[in-house]
Image (cartoon, helix red, strand yellow):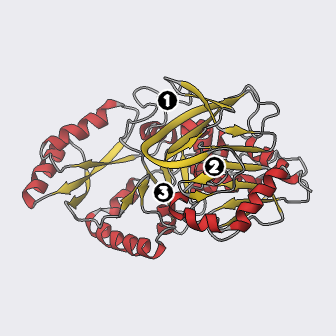
Amino acid sequence: MRVGAAKVGPDYIDPHLHALATGRASYNLDPVLTGSRGVTASLARAARHVDLVLVEGVMGLFDGTDLPVQQGATGRSPLGSTAQVAKQTGLPVVLIIDCAHLSQSVAAVAHGYRSFDPGLRIVGVILNHIKSATHDAFAREAMASAGIEVLGVIPHGGLAERRARHLGLLTAEEAPQSTREWIRTLSEAVRSLIDLERITRLAEPITSNAQHTTVVHSYPLGREQPARRPIIAYSEGPAASFIYPENLELMQEAGADTVGFDPRFESIPREAGLVWLHGGYPENYRDEIAANEPLLRALRRAATEHLPLVAECGGHLLLGSRLEDSKMAGVLPFTSTISSRLTLGYRLVGTTVTPPFLLAKGEEIPAHEFHYAASIPEGNAMTLTTARAQWRAGYLGDSFLSSYLHWHLGANEGLAPKLVAAARSQP
């Protein structure tokens, strides 16, 4: 069976693990960043050429955000929650419940989730952290009395753990061999613990609404595309693994070719018409990046020659003067440190800079932050708004955008063509 995967919310690490398990890209279903139409398009991408799509939720089923945008949240399913995405797409839900401190009460928990929003269809549960045969019997009997199907039971300690670090699990890029071994171990356990055949039968065909053309943000039909395809260079590898594959696809569909480079030991391709510096863990490889003088010199040259450049989060750190005790490119006047404070959440982003790069003056685009780093000064080119606060941060000019913000080009159908046009304008 050919399996595709997707992840609710603005996650990078889990989709990369999905990709290693399935052999194909995993896509983010994020109604905050891309709106309802973007979720439908991303699901359609995940459904291409596969027999089954498995969507991993985010946090608890009804955990979302209160960012002041309206993107189809209904009833008791908050904006950005797994419940909202499940309702929009019509996908059935399998609920995984931690039973470490529950026995019969697990049925009340499942019943509460099932009745909280009648618009959802919870088709069954997997019982996790079951500690004994008696515990198993109690939980199963309670679920049967509530009329809720048990689709699998995972004993306490029954699955191999994965080492965690700040911002999440150890990434697939950092340890590909051990990750493959971990996935093989998980697959053997899951095959014996979960009723995969039953779950497959419970899966629903993707609705015709989600089956519309997957190329939703490229040039409109009938418009002739320019012959020359500019090169967009993007950082990748263990130091820069926080990449939305859909961003690369959208830029390709808008008329560009994309070429990756590893900032630890590679430089920007000379033919690049635009550079995208991705986030990740540059702090763990800062000595290697600092020693990569061709890259730092190329970044300084890019700034001098006004080569279009987008730097997000970890990529932003490369443009400052120092990251901890290591020198960086020195393109922008800030120094960065890694702190113990996590900065996390969605933001609505706007600017009054004229002329702006990527952002149009007066419009707001949703973005996301997720980092432990701090920079001084943090810049003031963009206005960041949440439900409770507003402040200024980041650096923005006529040919560059650099900040801690992560961007999804599905947020606005004009973003990818705008980047490709900027890349094409280079000699």
For the residues carrying marks 1 and 3, which lies nearer the camera in this image? 3
Q: Residue furthest front?
A: 325
Is residue 116 shown above or below 252? above
Of the two numbered discs 2 and 3 on the same chain, state the one appearing first in sequence. 3
Q: State which quarter of the image contains the C terminus.
A: bottom right
Of the two numbered discs 1 and 2 on the same chain, state the one appearing first in sequence. 1
Label 2 with label 3: CB-CB less than 8 Å: no
Amino acid at dot 1 = Ala
Mark 1 surroundings: few (<14), some (14-19) or many (≥20) residues within 10 A: many
For the residues carrying marks 1 and 2, which lies nearer the camera in this image? 2
Amino acid at dot 2 = His
Q: CA distance from mark 1 to mark 2?
A: 32 Å
**For mark 2, what is the residue?**
316
Residue 118 picture location, percent across and down: 36, 31
Residue at 55% in and 46% down: 207
Residue 37 picture location, percent across and down: 62, 39
Of the two numbered discs 1 and 3 on the same chain, state the one appearing first in sequence. 3
Is residue 414 shown above or below 19? above
**For mark 1, what is the residue?**
73
Would residue 333 be visible to someone looking at this image?
A: yes
Closer to the camera, 136 or 234?
Answer: 234
Q: Secondary structure at mark 2?
A: helix
Residue 220 picture location, percent across and down: 82, 44
The answer to whether 271 appears left or right of 392 in the picture is right
| Quarter of the rendering containing residue 378 | top right
